[in-house]
Each structure stands twice: as structure tokens, then as C-alpha cells.
Amino acid sequence: MTFEEARDEVLAFRDDRDWAQFHNPKDLAISICLEASELLENFQWSGTDLAAKDKDVQIKEELADVLIYCIDMANCLDVNIADIISDKIKSDIEKYPVAKAKGNTRKYTQL
């Protein structure tokens, strides 16, 4: 499935249930954070298992929820996801030049 097909499926699911009326930037931002917290919960107390491999199904489901709400938010704000990702990468290329950032976890203000 292509990204466009997945996006259309997400929006059709929403529209079939008449949920667009509830989708506003504030509530979608809250929903993204809540779902991201549920994703993070899969790693809580995982000890040395940094990948939480026994929770693959739950991790995929929560990641899908985050992405679905991100698609809904992009639609609500009438932004093209590919464009905003490309713009952000271009900005980050300037902030994090390879010569300074490679293998380094410091924020761009500390490079």
C-alpha cells in the first residue's frame, strides 16, 4: 500500500463515521500525545530489552494510532505531509551539518 492509499483509507474511515466534526488542532494534538504515551508505555520497565521485542504487536498498534492522528492533523491543517517533512529535513541539514553532527547526540545549539 502506498502512503497516499493509507492516507485515503484513514480519511475514509473518519468520514464514514462523521468524525471530522470533532477534529480540531487542539484535540488532535492531544490525541497524538496520548497515543505517543501509550506507545512509550510498551518500553516502561523493559530493563535491558530496549526494543521490547515481546510487545511487537502492541508497539505497531500504538505507532499506527500516532500516525493516523498525524494524518488527521495534517488534513485538518490542510498541509501536505511530504512537503512539511521535506522542509523540516532541509532545515535540519543546516542545523546539523554532517561534519559536526555525525555520531553526536548534542542539540544543534551545542555543536
Image (cartoon, rainbow, N blue to C red):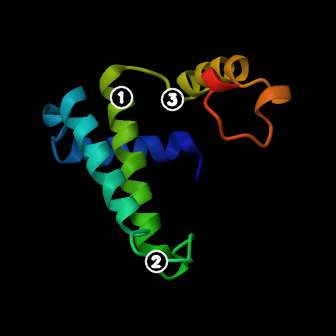
The amino acid on which the numbered mark 1 sits, given as a three-letter code, is Asn
Q: Find residue 1 and name its label.
A: none
Say few, some or many: other residues with alpha carbon within 10 Å of mark 2 (under 14 / 14 to 19 / 20 or more). few
Residue where numbered disc 2 is placed: 55
| 1 or 2: tag closer to the N-terminus | 2
Q: Is residue 53 left or right of residue 31?
A: right
- Rounded to the nearest angstrom, the CA distance separating label 3 from label 2 is 28 Å
For discs 3 and 2, the disc positioned in front in the rendered view: 2
60 versus 13 height, above or below: below
Q: Residue 31: image x %, image y %?
A: 25, 44
**At numbered mark 2, what does the secondary structure look like: helix, strand or loop?**
helix
Task: Find the distance from the CA under tag 1 to the CA under tag 2.
Answer: 30 Å
Q: Disc 1 or disc 2, which is closer to the eye?
A: 2
> Which one is nearer the viewer's eye here, 35 or 5?
35
Q: Which residue is mark 1?
A: 75
In the rendered image, residue 63, in percent from the top left (x then y), is placed at: 44, 57
Coordinates of residue 111 in the picture (x, y in percent): 71, 25
Residue 24 shows up from this direction: no
Q: Which residue has dot 3 on it?
A: 81
